[in-house]
Image (spheres, rainbow, N blue to C red):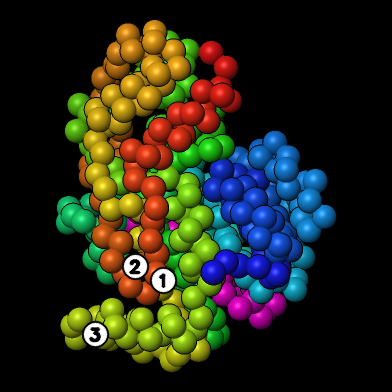
Amino acid sequence: MKIENKKVLVTGGAGFIGSNLVDRLLAQNNIVICLDNFATGKRENLANALQHPAFTLIEGDIRNYEDCQKAVEGCQYVLHQAALGSVPRSIADPMTSTDVNIGGFVKMLHAAKEANVKRFVYAASSSTYGDSKKLPKIENEIGRPLSPYAITKYVDELYADVFAKTYGMQCIGLRYFNVFGKRQTPDGAYAAVIPLWVKSLIKHESPYINGDGSYSRDFTYIENVIHANEQAMLQSTETIYKNRETYYNEDVAKRERLDIDATHFSEVFNVAFGGNTNLNQLFNTLRNNLAKHDPNIAKVDVIYRDKRPGDIPHSQASIFKAQTILNYQPKYSAEEGFARACEWYFENIKA
């Protein structure tokens, strides 16, 4: 099964995840609208899409309600990827992160409601688990947020839940766990760890590890994220509701979530592979993969420095809920993803 012959809005469609979603949707004969203000997205990420007759780029901002209305007009689905990511960015500038990630989210959600969008699928975040020490992470057991960014992403989930109950919407939040892959930029002050380290290694420069390298993550390859978004759109309302009953009937506390009828709902799902890689392991794996292309990379070592405020020590997902309700079946392990990503970066990053 695949999404085809639909009109889909991808907010943040010029970004890393958004542009990969745009390409997949266009390849499956959909009409795709992209809303992006290019604050973090890149026009070159849309190079292929801009040549496609079924693609429309709206250069606008989710903080502008008129832009949201224009973008969502006639769409059946919204894949809301637009946000200001990065924990350090939110610590440095909590006001802008809040303005975009909450204010923009609510405007987009309201515009989708007014346009009678069939389903609103949005990028949530594993940062929502905060200081919870429980592993693996299970959707209904979270801790206290550790950063302004984490707060914004959790508030988005609360808004989606209220819109589902109040206005009869179908909202699905996908809690991404450390997504990586093609087009994730190594540039800028808030670049993610994998492209940042890969760029350093290709230049024969030592990357930094914040802390002793024992912090671990459930690194998630981009193809798994695309698959999760597809499943969130593909599953019929009837199938989702039936599978929700199966999942929540495990205990009384979970059954209390079944207070929304079968026509509308709000759910969040972990999107990951369910693995665990610490930063020391990550460095060694990236170095080994890149050294296949340039043996001198094997000589590069890492530099350790102080821990970074707001970072979660360990993050590993339970994907049972997504498997049960959305039939999410991630294909690529972190190791397979690392190899594929290193191939792409070696071809696209200049030393």
**Mark 2: few/some/many CA within 10 Å (<14, 14-19, 20+):** some
Segment colored magenta: 109-128
**CA distance separating discs 3 and 2:** 16 Å
**Disc marking residue 323:** 2
Q: Is residue 187 left or right of residue 26?
A: left
Q: In what quadrant of the picture does the N terminus appear?
A: bottom right
Which amino acid is tagged 1?
Leu
Q: Which tag is nearer the camera, tag 1 or tag 3? A: 1
Image coordinates for residue 344, horizontal then vertical, percent: 52, 30
Q: Element at badge 3?
A: loop
Q: Which tag is nearer the camera, tag 3 or tag 2? A: 2
Q: Is residue 219 above or below residue 283?
A: below
**Cβ atoms under marks 2 and 1 closer than 8 Å:** yes
Q: Give me the residue at 30% from left, 13% from top.
A: 301
**CA distance separating discs 1 and 3:** 16 Å
Chain-order first, disc 1 or disc 3: 3
Q: Nearer the viewer, residue 224 or 130?
A: 224
Q: Nearer the viewer, residue 115 or 17?
A: 17
**Disc marking residue 249:** 3
Image coordinates for residue 198, horizontal then vertical, percent: 44, 24
Q: Element at badge 1?
A: helix
Chain-order first, disc 3 or disc 2: 3
Q: Is residue 309 above or below residue 123?
A: above
Q: Quadrant of residue 296?
A: top left
Q: Is residue 214 left or right of residue 261?
A: left
Q: Which residue position is annotated with label 1?
A: 326
Q: Give me the residue at 18% from left, 54% from top.
A: 135
Which amino acid is tagged 3?
Asn
